Amino acid sequence: MVSITDIAQKVGVSPSTVSRVMNGKKYVNAEKKAQILKIIAETGYVPNKAARDMVLQRSFTVGIVIPDTFNVFQRQLFSTIERQLVSFGYRSLFFFVKFDSSSEKQCLDRLKSEKLDGVIMLHEIKSPEFYAYLDNTKIPIVSTLCNDNAIPTIKIDDKQAASDGVHHLINLGHRRITMIAGCHFSFGLRRLEGYYQALDEAGIERNEKLVVDAQQYSSEAGMYAMRDLLLRSRDFSAVFAASDELAIGAMRAMLDEGLRIPEDISIVGFDDIDISNYFHPRLTTLRQPIFEIGEQSALKLHRYINGQTDAECTTVLPHKLIIRESTCSATPSR
């Protein structure tokens, strides 16, 4: 039975070079590639996964750390990452984790029990022990949200994006702008900072009573947050939500109260998930380039696994304000 090592010896290359050709990778001399493909065709070689992993001393497995809530934005991002990893020849193991220390420890224990080539973070873990383990074992890691410059990250500028969204409302004449903020995560804090930055730049006084923290980034949490806001006061004309799902939940609560969107209250979301363009009214939002974030996260990890490093640890991709039907000019009284 022909092995990958046999093919490598016939051509005079390493087994890893043969593997790169079989997986459609670049960085192989065209002449050598042709010779390898010719030998494969002549011998009828069928790669054995276990043998390939042993020869290359790789598991071809990537761990993806996912929040237990796993909202729509993260699902869209995950599907892109998964497709890209498959194209590079990896399989994925999923590590679901809640936002508490015991769940983070369980996630770390599971991660230690697996042989992984790399890890992609779709969840922000606080435990220093988690990152210390990855650092000590030299497992490549890429994040899609971390604000720690020591961790390679693909993301947008959350603070500036939030500021742009609030400025849109300010430019429409709104002055009493409330925010449904996310809690727990650093990207949520950066979006809150962007909200305050826009108010400061417009000379609008900050009012913490106009900010409510949602317990999760979900439509249900957005609905409860908006009900809370409406119970406190209705003296606001616009809402900035830290995610589209929060915004959609808030819209449901407003419509249940007989409020018109945007005539009574304008609202801006964040992410531009698919449903934001189909909910009625269609949601004005800050678009994250979900496909590009997922694709580049997988590519960056693949490069690190193969010993390549980037000059820039963090890649900041552009965001875009998408103006739809959920915002309009403020009435003179608001």
Image: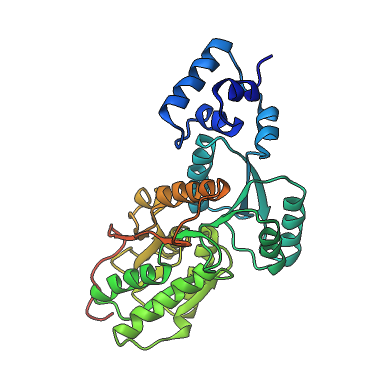
Q: Position of residue 155 (x, y in %)?
A: 45, 60
Q: Horizontally, is 29 left or right of 18 in the view?
A: left
Q: How is the image coloured?
A: rainbow
Quarter of the image for residue 269 reads bottom left
At horizontal 75% and vertical 51% (from top left) the residue drawn is: 110
Q: Horizontally, is 21 left or right of 7 in the view?
A: left
Q: Position of residue 118 (x, y in %)?
A: 62, 49
At horizontal 53% and vertical 16% (from top left) the residue drawn is: 39
Q: Look at the picture and state if 301 lies above or below 266.
A: above
Q: Is residue 290 visible?
A: yes
Total count of labels = 0
At horizontal 48% and vertical 43% (from top left) the residue drawn is: 80
Q: Position of residue 193 (x, y in %)?
A: 44, 77
Q: Is residue 255 visible?
A: no
Is 18 in front, or is 118?
18
Q: Position of residue 289 (x, y in %)?
A: 38, 53
Q: Residue furthest front?
A: 12
Q: Look at the picture and state if 22 lies above or below 229.
A: above
Q: Horizontally, is 106 left or right of 80 in the view?
A: right
Q: Quadrant of the N terminus?
A: top right
Q: Quadrant of the C terminus?
A: bottom left
At horizontal 35% and vertical 50% (from top left) the residue drawn is: 277
Is 326 in front, or is 234?
326
Q: Look at the picture and state if 172 lies above or below 31.
A: below
